Image (tube, helix red, strand yellow):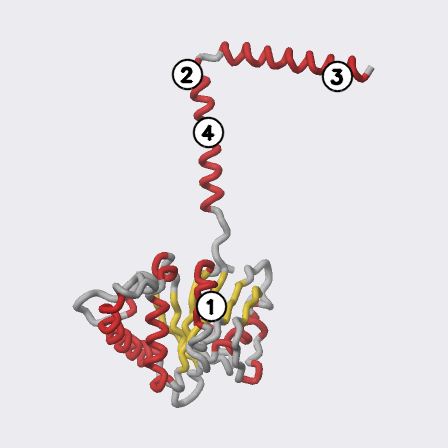
């Protein structure tokens, strides 16, 4: 009985296929080709839409010299605690969370993937691991001890601004002047001008080496003009914060500008 049923089904399918073949032959070739073209075009467009609808990056990277206060800022953003104010990290702090200041807000809020990259010179290459996914980069500067560290900060910032990933993807950079709650802290305008002056000196000395330096694929500024951050291909802005007091409104604004809530 089962064999008879199978044979009946087989004959029925063959009959359907013959009918379908007849119908196809009755359709004019131009209409048939047009239908096939429409199917292929629709498939291509759907793939294209899917490609462009990929999830936008939600990673914001904190970096800068050791002692600038990156890790305190990270913990303030995550849970509103300064962790006693002194935290030295030798491994990246990484987490995905809703900003602490937004915890009381109603509705669904998109979490941010925050990464705090250690500032020690030997550990800075870890930054390259996170740049391909970065929606924004925060370069933290110690506004209190800025002058003794100005040269070192400028060199590190120069290296960041000439990285291929930063330039090609036009990753926005926020220069965040931390510890501005202290009376003797330098203003963001002063820090910006000093960094521009130091980077202007650096690009002159490094331009001659760039041809031999495979890692440095890009140069900064406009030939014959003094360097300013507005000449960068990516957007570079300057802001202020205090990790100890929790005053980070400008930092949070930068984060939400590039990782929409």
Label 1, label 4: how far apart the Cα atoms are: 44 Å
Q: Which numbered mark, 1 or 2, is in the foreground of this view?
A: 1
Q: Which residue does the image show at 59% across and 59% down from the upper left?
A: 107
| Picture residue at 66% right of the left edge, 15% below the top | 13
- Residue at disc 1, secondary structure: helix
| 122 versus 218 height, above or below | below
Indicate the quadrant where residue 125 lies. bottom left
Q: Position of residue 245 (x, y in %)?
A: 51, 82
Q: Are marks 1 and 2 in contact (CB under 8 Å)?
A: no
Of the two numbered discs 4 and 3 on the same chain, state the one appearing first in sequence. Answer: 3
Q: CA gap, disc 2 to disc 3? A: 38 Å
Q: Nearer the viewer, residue 149 or 77?
A: 149
Q: Mark 4–mark 3 contact, CB under 8 Å? A: no
Q: Earlier in the sequence, mark 1 or mark 4?
A: 4
Could you give the CA–CA distance between mark 2 and mark 4, rounded to whole angstroms?
Answer: 15 Å
- Viewer-proximal residue among 118 and 111: 118
Q: Quadrant of residue 178?
A: bottom left
| Secondary element at image label 4 | helix
Q: Residue furthest right?
A: 1
**Residue 120 in the image: above or below residue 129:** below
Instruction: Measure how far apart labels 4 and 3 are at the Cα level.
Output: 35 Å
Badge 1 or badge 2: first in the primary sequence: 2
For residue 258, say whether it is visible: no
- Disc on res. 170: none
- The answer to whether any part of residue 123 appears in the image is yes
Residue 126 shows which numbered tag?
1
């Amino acid at each position: 009985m089962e064999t008879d049923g199978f044979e009946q089904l087989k004959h029925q399918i063959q009959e359907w296929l013959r009918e379908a073949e007849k119908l196809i032959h009755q359709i004019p070739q131009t209409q048939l080709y047009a239908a096939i073209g429409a199917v292929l075009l629709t498939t291509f467009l759907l793939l294209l839409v899917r490609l462009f609808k990929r999830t936008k990056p939600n990673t914001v990277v904190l970096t800068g010299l050791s002692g600038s206060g990156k890790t305190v800022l990270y913990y303030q953003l995550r849970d509103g605690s300064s962790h006693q104010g002194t935290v030295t990290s030798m491994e990246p702090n990484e987490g995905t969370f809703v900003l602490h200041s937004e915890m009381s807000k109603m509705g669904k809020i998109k979490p941010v993937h925050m990464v705090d990259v250690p500032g020690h010179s030997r550990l800075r290459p870890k930054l390259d691991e996170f740049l391909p996914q970065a929606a924004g980069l925060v370069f933290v500067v110690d506004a209190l001890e800025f002058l003794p560290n100005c040269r070192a900060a400028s060199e590190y910032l120069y290296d960041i601004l000439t990285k291929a990933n930063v330039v090609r993807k036009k990753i926005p950079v926020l220069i965040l002047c931390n510890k501005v709650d202290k009376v003797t802290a330098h203003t963001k305008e002063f820090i910006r001008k000093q960094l521009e002056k130091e980077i202007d000196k650096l690009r002159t000395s490094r331009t001659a080496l760039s041809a031999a330096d495979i890692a440095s694929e890009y140069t900064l500024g406009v030939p014959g003009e003094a360097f300013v951050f507005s000449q960068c291909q990516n957007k570079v802005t300057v802001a202020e914060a205090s990790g100890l007091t929790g005053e980070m409104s400008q930092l949070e604004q930068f984060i939400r500008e590039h990782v929409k809530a």
